[in-house]
């Protein structure tokens, strides 16, 4: 936009200059008539001429009525002699003011040259502008191979510095990177001991766990520049551009002295080589080769650390992970309940919370949430409170934001008929009642038949504590809970709908994993079935074939069907024993559409274990 306005200004300036020159040498608004000398002599004889100005051979005649005419005299003769010869009397000629003027000055000098120089000047300016734009294009072509890394830290481009205090949780990860901070602050202490600091630090974790935030905190704590670039920024359609940008990035970082180079989403350029796709001169492979060369080219006393983040470490080329390159891998796990509480406290800063809010309860209700999910949760709660014109964020907005993040926004336009509402109520009541009847199932926190996202209703079960392993008994009870909605529909209405389709899909997946992946089948034993070949160029695992016979495949299918059938029978038996409770829960759902955990505990006649545990804490 700036270049366009500048060129537009130059064009307007040229047009104004041309207009001014033409206005200087011509007067298009004054009509001047050219007459002969005989006519001039006649006008003098009739005493109509007041003044004659002589400029070379040009005559400018001014009349008594204010008009002006032009004429031309003979070059070698005087004007008075010519007029006397044309019959003008001496006394009448004497009454006319004759003023001779020398043809000199700027107009006399530039006038003849203007018609030659002006076109040349216009062409010169035109070509000058063309060459200038061409020179600018060449400069942009050279800039095309420069790294597009963003600089934070030392140059003051990061308005709010990120410290370790701003990174909640991740205790082990922060301990691992602390020595990187110490090396960047005091490199001589390590060099004197003959120690070599790890040149590459690879941050591995699910999306949203704070990998980029931790890298910025390291740079901020060490007080060094932070060059940040994404892996996809190095890849272009032109061969050699990616490697040129890598060279430029590392060269810039080395000039800064102590610095951190951060490459986000390393798997975009660091995938395993040698699959033959794209040939040996593939642009991505050339870029990866250049990164490997640059990391090998560090001198011992150079205080430049390369940090990268990825959530797909399995697809990375082995050459990246050898000692001397990314020889330190730091795992960032999803936060536990204590870490989630600390993260919520950070994101609650600057937000007016009501006195009755308890972030600890929100942390307990959000297992599996990453730091980014929790930040989104707090932001959604603030938006909901502002939409309701509230001055503070209450616990209700926080609960509602959990449902929105998990399942999507409430679909108020999705209105169920009376029959569909009743079917959905019994379906969700079946899930909840079976869950409350089995001991190896997470406690029910909420039941709702309000449509959210693609779900017509939902039963929210959340663990009371974080767990990292799951037993066979827990899997079997989970299968029964999934089939609780199916069993309730068939028991009450004598028919089934499309509502349980998603439940059956999940149940089939869990049952097949029990048999094939976890070796939990009593009939087939502690054996896993099926082998997967990793395909890094596609970024996922693909099943390449079966390592078992067709007879074994038949046994697997039968075992999966047996597990699902047993789960269905268990769910039906639980619901038949507690049919009155099932009807009671369904009726409350039809009336209120939502049941919280305290009310549900009263309906099933069991104490709210999560609440009592919370009171003891």
Image: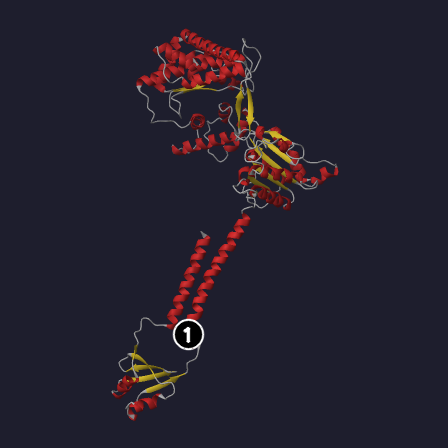
**Residue 205: image location, x then y, percent:** 56, 29
Q: Residue furthest bottom?
A: 90
Residue 483 located left or right of residue 61: right
Q: Residue furthest left?
A: 46
Placement of 398 over or under 4, stated as above or below: above
Q: Is residue 64 visible?
A: yes
Q: How is the image coloured?
A: secondary structure
The secondary structure type at the circle numbered 1 is helix
**Residue 434: image location, x then y, percent:** 44, 12
Residue 374 versus residue 203: which sits nearer the camera?
203
Placement of 551 over or under 350, stated as above or below: above
Task: Read off the residue under disc 1.
Answer: 111
**Residue 94: image location, x then y, percent:** 31, 91
Residue occupying image coordinates x 46% and y 9%: 566
Placement of 20 over or under 493, stated as above or below: below
Residue 106 located left or right of residue 142: left
**Residue 235: image location, x then y, percent:** 54, 39
Residue 304 versus residue 536: which sits nearer the camera?
536
Count of marks placed on residues? 1
Residue occupying image coordinates x 33% and y 18%: 420
To which quarter of the image does residue 158 belong?
top right
Residue 153 located left or right of residue 15: right
Quarter of the C terminus within the rendering: top right
Q: Is residue 149 visible?
A: no
Other-residue count near label 1 (Cα within 10 Å), few / some / many at <14 / 14–19 / ≥20: few
Residue 361 versus residue 132: which sits nearer the camera?
132
Residue 26 versus residue 570: which sits nearer the camera?
26
């Amino acid at each position: 936009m700036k270049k366009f306005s500048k060129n537009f200004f130059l064009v307007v300036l040229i047009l104004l200059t041309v207009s001014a020159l033409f206005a200087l040498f011509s007067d298009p608004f004054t009509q001047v008539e050219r007459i002969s000398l005989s006519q001039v002599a006649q006008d003098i004889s009739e005493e109509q001429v007041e003044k004659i100005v002589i400029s070379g051979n040009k005559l400018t005649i001014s009349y008594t009525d204010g008009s002006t005419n032009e004429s031309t005299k003979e070059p070698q003769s005087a004007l008075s002699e010519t007029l006397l010869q044309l019959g003008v009397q001496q006394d009448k000629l004497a009454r006319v003011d004759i003023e001779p003027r020398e043809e000199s000055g700027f107009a006399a000098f530039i006038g003849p040259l203007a018609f030659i120089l002006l076109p040349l000047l216009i062409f010169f300016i035109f070509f000058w502008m063309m060459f200038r734009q061409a020179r600018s294009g060449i400069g942009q072509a050279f800039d095309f191979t420069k790294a597009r890394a963003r600089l934070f830290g030392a140059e003051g481009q990061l308005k709010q510095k990120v410290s370790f205090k701003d990174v909640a949780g991740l205790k082990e990860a922060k301990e691992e990177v602390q020595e990187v901070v110490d090396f960047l602050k005091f490199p001589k202490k390590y060099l004197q001991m003959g120690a070599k600091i790890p040149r590459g630090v690879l941050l591995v974790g699910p999306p949203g766990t704070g990998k980029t935030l931790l890298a910025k905190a390291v740079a901020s704590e060490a007080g060094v520049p932070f060059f940040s670039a994404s892996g996809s920024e190095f890849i272009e359609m032109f061969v050699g551009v990616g490697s040129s940008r890598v060279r430029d990035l590392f060269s810039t970082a080395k000039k800064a002295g102590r610095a951190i180079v951060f490459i986000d989403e390393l798997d975009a350029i660091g995938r395993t080589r040698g699959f033959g796709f794209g040939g040996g001169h593939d642009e991505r492979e050339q870029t990866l080769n250049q990164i490997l060369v640059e990391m090998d080219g560090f001198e011992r006393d150079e205080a430049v650390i390369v940090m990268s983040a990825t959530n797909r470490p399995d697809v990375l080329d082995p050459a990246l992970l050898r000692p001397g390159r990314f020889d330190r891998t730091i795992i960032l796990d999803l936060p536990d309940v204590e870490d989630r509480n600390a993260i919520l406290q950070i994101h609650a800063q600057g937000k007016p919370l009501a006195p009755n809010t308890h972030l600890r309860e929100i942390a307990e209700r959000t297992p599996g949430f990453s730091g980014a999910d929790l930040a989104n949760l707090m932001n959604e709660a603030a938006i909901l409170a502002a939409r309701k014109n509230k001055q503070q964020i209450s616990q209700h907005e926080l609960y509602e934001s959990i449902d929105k993040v998990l399942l999507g926004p409430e679909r108020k336009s999705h209105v169920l008929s009376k029959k569909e509402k009743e079917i959905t109520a019994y379906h969700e009541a079946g899930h909840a009642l079976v869950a409350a009847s089995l001991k190896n199932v997470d406690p029910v926190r909420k039941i709702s038949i309000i449509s959210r996202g693609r779900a017509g209703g939902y039963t929210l079960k959340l663990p009371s504590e974080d767990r990292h392993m799951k037993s066979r008994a827990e899997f079997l009870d989970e299968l029964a809970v999934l089939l609780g909605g199916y069993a309730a529909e068939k028991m009450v209405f004598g028919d089934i709908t499309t509502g349980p389709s998603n439940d059956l899909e999940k149940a089939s997946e869990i049952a097949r994993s029990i048999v094939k992946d976890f070796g939990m089948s009593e009939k087939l034993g502690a054996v896993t079935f099926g082998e997967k070949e990793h395909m890094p160029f596609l970024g996922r695992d693909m099943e390449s074939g079966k390592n078992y016979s067709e007879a074994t495949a038949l046994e697997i299918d039968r075992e999966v069907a047996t597990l699902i059938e047993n789960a269905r029978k268990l769910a039906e038996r639980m619901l038949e024993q507690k049919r009155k409770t099932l009807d009671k829960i369904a009726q409350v759902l039809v009336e209120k559409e939502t049941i919280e955990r305290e009310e549900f505990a009263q309906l099933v006649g069991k104490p709210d274990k999560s609440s009592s545990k919370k009171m003891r804490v």
